[in-house]
Image (cartoon, rainbow, N blue to C red):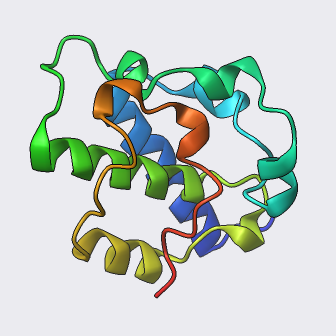
Amino acid sequence: MKVDERCDVYSFGVLTMEIFMGRHPGDLISCLPLSSSASTSTSVPNDNQQILLKDVIDQRLSPPVRQVAKDVVSTTKLAFACLNGNPQLRPTMRQVAQALNRQSLPLPNPFSIIILGELWDHEVCSG
């Protein structure tokens, strides 16, 4: 394994999900698609992709609303990009920082019905 900035960005994705989940995201990471490519978006989604984001977030916290919900969704998308199975498709830390500085996009659905499968296959670091 080549150790470089792409490993750091993977660690950022793990840490981000650990903060949101309140526990290590090992089981969640193991069910993510190997890469965020067009081929995964056209394949039949597995049951793990149908998990609601609200069910993954630490249940000890109040459900996020308004801007916080947008930020949680945007940051989860970013974390999933960092966890891409192909290191070459992961964003750089510079791209991560730029994405974190941008305003969160409107939610695609109400927070309570957003599924994990909606949060990968997105170009969150472009632009």
Query: Residue 45: x, y in percent?
Result: 77, 31
Q: Is residue 77 left or right of residue 85?
A: left
Query: Residue 124: x, y in percent?
Result: 49, 68
Give the farthest residue toward the top.
Answer: 60
Q: Is residue 19 left or right of residue 61?
A: right
Q: Is residue 82 left or right of residue 2?
A: left
Choose top left, top right, bottom left or bottom right for residue 35. Answer: bottom right
Residue at image coords 76%, 42%: 33
Choose top left, top right, bottom left or bottom right for residue 48. Answer: top right
Choose top left, top right, bottom left or bottom right for residue 65. Answer: top left
Name the foreground residue: 98 vs 70: 70
Give the farthest residue toward the bottom.
Answer: 127
Give the farthest residue toward the front.
Answer: 109
Name the foreground residue: 30 vs 46: 46
Query: Residue 13: x, y in percent?
Result: 49, 50
Quadrant of the rendering where the N terminus is positioned: bottom right
Residue at image coords 64%, 67%: 90
Residue at image coords 41%, 43%: 15
Query: Residue 73: x, y in percent?
Result: 35, 46
